[in-house]
Amino acid sequence: MDINLFTFAFGLLILGECSARVVRVSPGPLIRVESQPVSIKCDVRDYGGPREQDFEWEMSREMNGPKIKIISTFDASYSDSTLSKRIASGDISVVRLKDNEAELKIAEVKSQDAGFYWCHTPSTDLVISGNYVAQVQLTVIPNTLKVSPKALPPVVPEGSDITLSCNVTRELTHPTYLSVTWSVKKGATSEQILTFGPQGEVVTGTKFARRYADGGIRLVPGTNGLFELVISRVMTSDEGIYECNGTEWTHETGGKWVKIVESTKELGTVAVTPTGHSLSVKASSSSPFSTSLLHSPGDTLALLCFVAADNLPALTLEVAWLADGREIITMDRSGVVISNASSTGAQEKRGEASLERTGAGEYRLGVRGVSGQDGGLYTCRIRAFIEKGGRSTGGGGRWHMAAEKTSSPVTVKISEIKPNFTLNLEATVIPQMTAEPTELSCHVTNITQLPPGGRLGVSWEHITLPGIGDNPQTSHPIGSLDGNGNLLPESMYGDRLKSGVLSLSRVQPNTFKLRFLRSQEVDMGQYVCIVSSWSVNGQGDMVKTSEQKSAALTVRWDTKRPALNVVAKRTREASVGGATFEMTCTVVPENLGEAGYSVLIQTQESMDSTVRTIMTLSPDYVVQHGGATDPNRRDGLVLTKSGPAEFRFRLAGVQVSDRGYYWCDITAWTKQQPGQTWTKATSSKSNKIRIDFEENGPSFNIAIHSDISSVYPWETAKMECSLSVSGSSPKTDDLVYEVRWFFTRLRGGHAAVPVAGIDRFGIVEKANRNSSSDVSIERKNTHTYVLHIFGTQDSDSGEYHCIATPWYLSASTGAWTEAGELTSGRVFLTVKFAVWDSLKMPLLYGVSASLGVGLFSLILGLVCAQCCCRNMAHTPRSGNKLMDLEMD
């Protein structure tokens, strides 16, 4: 038992040496303002005993003066009687934050509360170690902070600047610091604009950071506590109640800034008047009260635009003049003038416009050399912009369009005497069918009041017929000739005008023509010519002064579909083999103008057989041979154009295989204009002409046989294909054969597989084989061919047959003629598997080896018995029997 107590005491001693109680309070000295709340925290660490610790607070006005007990966490009667009322009212209280941390709180600190404060922690340790009390000094200074704002104007125009002035001061008796914060309240929400201090730093609110970076918000520190914040170019979103907050700070030990007192004052409620409420625009001539102007052609038109606004110096303006709602000239907000006058053609040409700023809010429009096109309603449009960035950005900030206003219109009239004339539109050439020319003439008569140097121009329009082209009917401009004679094509007819298929011309000063070289169906419809008069203005330019439209003229024709009638005639008869066949095909077109033709020469053996193409001729006279043409006979085939609509086909050296029906398949092609591709119009076939003649040539027979029908593997199999000739047998040198061998597998289907073949020139061609066997073809004589299969395999079993095509030199034509194809019967080949032949030698070798080994084993045993197991030394028995017995 004594040993245990000693061990426990020793452990406590070691524990006490390793850890010691530490009591800490808020770092000081603490500087606080009178009537403001004070908080002093106290915590304890590395202690023994229960987790929850108690705290006692004492204070003394002097370092070594008498102490006054303030409050305790475990003894309600601990406090000094002089503090009982303050403790009862809650002015002085202690709050436990954690088991080891408590906070002394004074709701409104008084000047007599200044002094030294001690935090005690009663000991719960087994060993007294460390500190049990901590001390901090509290300094209480009077509240000398003053915030004096300068009132703001209640209403400011959009784009103006507002200055938020606030004077923040205090009496410097101890080292304290000041900061000032501006904020704006919109309803129940307050948004911080900017904070300056306490170390001279600037912190902006989230919504105002970009604006401060652009220079739209500027801080202007003054003297004697005056701080000013300038908000440039205010917008309607800047409305609200502006406030100024002054705060006094102290910098405690450890680098912590503590707010000790603050005061917030309102600068006033600001309303922002939108620019659109005060912006006004007025357009007039040099006389502010004139709303209608009358000018003669060639005069200079001058109009003024007056702009007024409450905050005009803060606005950047974009000024544009519009004539009948169309912009003619614009001055952008940077002062650059952009002319928007149309320059698409002389007929749209207006006078030369200029725009300049003649004073604050005053802009002058000038139009030199006005013509009839310059008459109309003129308005001045103003767009007012406010730069979101501050003036320090040098105009590089972001822009906000604050308002847009357009003035009342000013009527400008151009007095001029318009020429008068009469129009007569007639069709001088009317097409009878599609692809024929069309010509229209527009005559101008009874011309009066055309000024000296005046000219006439024309424009043409086309209106489609119902059911042709657009539906519903639509008017399409074709093109025009201006006063200088310039051709101005429209997009829809531009390609046809450039290629010359469609033309506009002036054949006389008062006569204009529209001509279609090749009329199309879509060209049917109503046509109108619009004649305009042109005169020279003050700048020497041709300007349009008047125009007049003719009555509509309907142009249409019978839209018969084009057709072809093709007739084939035999010009040379091929009555015997080797003769020349020739035929012509004549084309008779209907409802078709100038066209090109393509020709196909086609044939078939009978009316039910497949149609084959022999030759083709394109509209551009390119000849090609079809797939049915033998390459060796192309020199004997001719296809030419023998007339305007006639084509000739010649076949030299006809053969038996050429017998059948021949005809022409002809297609008509047209071009809408030169250089374009051919377009198919119609096609037709001719009647059929037959080539039929008798060829008294030889007749052939074919047979196949084999000496043996079964072989063993690796043996050679032979099959003969024999041909015979009957009738008029040609000479041996005038007869050759093409022979091909085919094989049908025993297992693998009914399809015949090529094996090998020899053509009429003696060239052997072998097919790809899966078997390891090889084949060859031997020509024994003119009529006999032998197929050899070397090293036969089981996969070579099956049926074999041969197909032969005889070729003979025709006595009548002197040309090689192909006879009909001959197919032989079938022979069956079996490749047997010889079981005894494959096993007899291995069995013989096994029996011989067994007998040899047995005989050798018998001889070896006899030799060992005679030589190795016999006792060669004889020992005579002793005469002493007793001794022998004893030995035994």
Image (spheres, grey):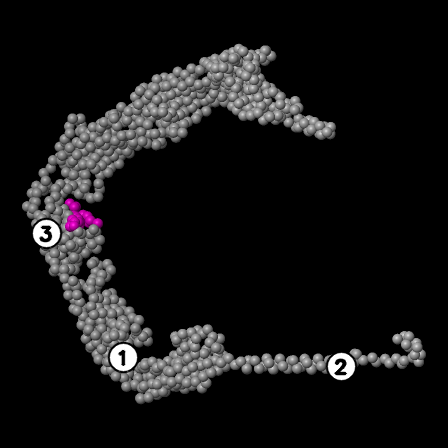
The residue at the point 62 percent across, 26 percent down is 48
Q: Can you say whether 631 is above or below 303 in the image?
A: below
* Residue 85 sits above or below residue 452 on the image: above
SS type, badge 3: strand
Image: magenta residue range? 472-491
Residue 183 percent across, percent down from the top left: 38, 23
Mark 3 residue type: Leu
Dot 1 corresponds to which residue? 654
2 and 3 marks in contact (CB < 8 Å): no
For badge 1, the amino acid type reads Val
User: Is label 2 in a helix, a strand or a loop?
Assistant: helix
Residue at 42%, 74% in the rendered image: 748
Q: Quadrant of residue 855?
A: bottom right
Q: Which residue is mark 3?
A: 553
Q: Residues within 10 Å of mark 2 (few under 14, many from 20)?
A: few
Residue neighbourhood size for the residue with mark 3, other residues' Cα within 10 Å, grouped as few (<14), some (14–19), many (≥20): some
Can residue 642 be seen here? no
Return the mark for residue 863: 2
In-image side of 867 versus 267 (left or right) = right
